[in-house]
Amino acid sequence: MRIAIVNDLRIAQEILRRAVALMPGASVAWVAADGLEALAACKRDKPDLILMDMVMPVMDGAVATRAIMKECACPILVVTSTIEGNLSLVYEALSAGAIDAVQTPQFDAAGAITGIDTLIRKSRVALAATASFTSQRHVSSAAAMPLANTLSQRRGARTLLLAIGSSTGGPHALSVVLGGLTNHASHCTIIVQHIDISYAAGLAAWLTGEIKKPVRIALEGEQLQSGLILVAASDDHLVIRNGRVHYVREPIDQIYRPSVDALFHSLATDESVKGTAVLLTGMGRDGAEGLRALRTAGWQTIAQDQNSSVVWGMPGAAVALGAAMQILPLNAIGGAASRTLGGAVAPS
């Protein structure tokens, strides 16, 4: 495993070198002091993972992430001194395709490095998903089945729900889908985005600013209600039981926490809810099996198409399983979901 470091501060470079040295089988591919230098280095020598700072001279990390994902795509983990202080840059990078974000480890008063365990854990998650950048299957959107009206199969359900799963490139994709919905008041929306618990509230705040509607974190035990837009905020999995939010540790061995599959499978067996499930851009295959379970249970299911996905891992896996009733470009998903959920569609 070859890991590149992009950071203009010498002390941060040294800390990250030490972190890489602690990862079994990992080595430093190269070090760059700004985004432009990193882009050039990546073109010459693409690593397995890039640890990307945000605030740098010449080219910042968000712009560099977008350029790298376009020209020589590889997994990128945002590593910056403060997530909250660089919130707009962090979510710009996550929207462009960065996998996750973590604060840069630091030396404490005794000279030990704090925060290194979290960096190593997130690096392992990112490295585990590397294959998604090279093994994406192409499935034409023409293969999608017509969207049938199957919501009536659960006539006793109390809550109409839009369930969305996303990962790499997810923040931007979420803002587009949520912005394209025409009747938020007709249903509850619940989102699982692969992101650390520390940044879930920031994601909710960022989405609120993007779509001009309130988005907040989902609370343990709360009842789903029409009009709410909720984001999972735990290192455990968000599931729905009898129309209420719960956070659970099982399955323990699931690499993504929270897991889209955990949410989708819980919805497939909960007779109190019905609705539409959407699987957006992301590495790996989390959510694919769950989307198929929801389709079997009578839900409407939509997967983002390959051309509009930053990484067509998760939605591509769902399409390969026959889990998606529709395969749509990102800008068409909000309108399609609104139709299935009974919202009036604004004229184009």
Image (spheres, helix red, strand yellow):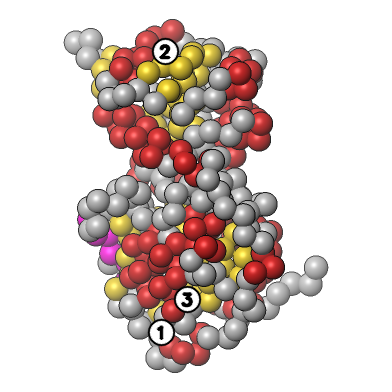
Report the residue at 74% width, 72% height from top: 346
Q: Is residue 160 magenta?
A: no
Residue type at tag 2: Gln
How many angstroms separate mark 1 from mark 2 (CA)?
54 Å
Residue type at tag 1: Arg
- Quarter-wise, where is residue 324 in the image? bottom right
Point out which mark residue 295 bears.
Answer: 3
How many angstroms separate mark 3 from mark 2 (CA)?
47 Å
Horizontal side of 34 relative to 26 (left or right) equals right
Residue topped by disc 2: 13
- Quarter-wise, where is residue 119 in the image? top left
Sequence-wise first label, 3 or 2: 2
- Quarter-wise, where is residue 223 in the image? bottom left
How many angstroms separate mark 3 from mark 1 (CA)?
19 Å
Magenta segment main secondary structure: strand
Horizontal side of 184 relative to 16 (left or right) equals right
Residue 88 appears anywhere in the view: no
Report the residue at 37% width, 10% height from top: 14
Residue type at tag 3: Arg
Report the residue at 62% width, 60% height from top: 139
**The N terminus is located in which quarter?**
top left
Point out which mark residue 325 bears.
Answer: none
Q: SS class of the residue under badge 2?
A: helix
Q: Residues within 10 Å of mark 1 (few under 14, many from 20)?
A: some
Q: Which residues are magenta?
A: 244-249
Is residue 126 shown above or below 324?
Answer: above
Sequence-wise first label, 3 or 1: 1
